[in-house]
Image (tube, helix red, strand yellow):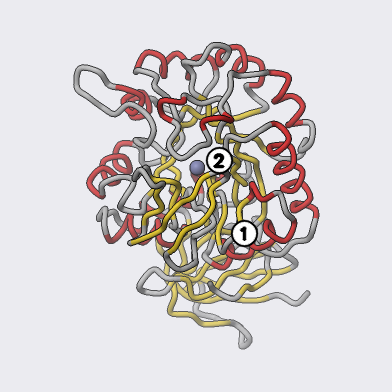
Amino acid sequence: MSARHLHGRAFIRGAIQDDTLVTLSDGAITDVVQTTDVPADATRTAALIVPGFIDCHVHGGDGADFMDADDSANARVLSFHARCGTTALAATTLSASRPDLHAAVDAVVRATFAGRRGAEVCAIHLEGPYINVERSGAQDVASIRPPDIQEIAALIVEAPRLQWLMTIAPELPGARALIEHFKGRITFSIGHTAADYGDAVAALEWGASHFTHLFNAMSGLHHREPGVVGAALVSTDATAELIADGIHVHPAVLRIAARAMPTRVALVTDAMRACGLPDGTYKLYGYDVTVAEGAARLANGTLAGSVLTMSGAVRNMVELAGMPIESVLPLATEVPARILGVADRKGKLEPGYDADVVLLNEKLGIDRVFARGEELMPA
Ligand SMILES: [Zn+2]
């Protein structure tokens, strides 16, 4: 495959650098240099050249969901989010019956071998079923059950080469044993939880290292009861997801989190199947979800995932939360690459890294996307 050259402003080592020549060849970034000596065949762009986005928490989009456990549905999700700038992701499941979870995992594993089109599946994120029914959000309450080491052991053998994340409520009986048993193999994320501050700090000591959609489905920060949110903010190394759609979390609180945890926040979409489609009523596992005015809700008003894309999350952090783009881009690239264990090959524009590259226009929309070197039509 012949090399492709992109020349323009690029996000390199935490700063925006003019006159940068980025060379892609055979699915990898082969060179990144600052130069005004531009090859004749280079694409000169006025857009900002940034690493592809990485989403640790995404259920679906374009009418499809990883819980559909269907090859064409998974191809649809991976294509759609890639065309929105997400070049790598954690395929995220919901609380579901044992057979349905197995079927979903099997289908995700098939998708990782099916070809190289669209976003790369780097991990599986099990969001449930070991969560607190009191903070279940839009999860299927009937599928929530106590932690079971055998069940998880049987799941992870199906995808030995993928990273695993698991959202868990640490206050459940058996949660500690599960975390201590699988830590190192599974990244445990505190979420959908009625835990207090002390419970959350204890879970970090057992081996949890991440927080699922910080602020949502957990206790908030009170000055006399710091809550799960307080445990995340005060931690030195745990990471936390933020749904930056401007609905799940107030823009001022998005800004507080990004400033308090500048190298520990991962922007996520938590996108469900309606993402990219018109308003209407859609399925989320067992439930009907209605999408209107940018929010996806159950009939009782509970938020049920989002219709956010990663480029939308980046734009909202700049335009709603008022953060500088240089501070926001790592939250969509380097931080999630670290969480998903792919920081040695994704999340930065550096020689040797995967050719996952996004060109952002001045409105922070997607101009062009390259996923492992292959150019995709923007969604
Ligand atoms: Zn979710």
Q: Secondary structure at mark 1?
A: helix
The Cα atoms of the two marked residues, 1 and 2, are separated by 23 Å
Q: Is 32 left or right of 195, judged from the image as shown?
A: right
Residue 118, placed above or below residue 317: below
Asked if marks 1 and 2 touch (Cβ < 8 Å), the reply is no
Residue 108, placed above or below residue 129: below
Q: Nearer the viewer, residue 6 or 111?
A: 111
Mark 2 is surrounded, within 10 Å at the Cα level, by few (under 14), some (14 to 19) or many (20 or more) other residues, namely some
Q: Is mark 1 within 8 Å of ligand 1?
A: no
Q: Which residue has dot 1 on it?
A: 77
Spot occupied by residue 163 in the image (x, y as percentages of width and height):
67, 37
Q: Nearer the viewer, residue 33 or 362?
A: 362
**Residue visible at 62% across and 21% down in the picture:** 183
**Residue visible at 57% across and 70% down in the picture:** 369
Q: Residue furthest left?
A: 223
Q: Which residue has dot 2 on it?
A: 338
Dot 2 amino acid type: Arg
Q: Nearer the viewer, residue 55 or 49?
A: 55
**Residue visible at 33% across and 62% down in the picture:** 293
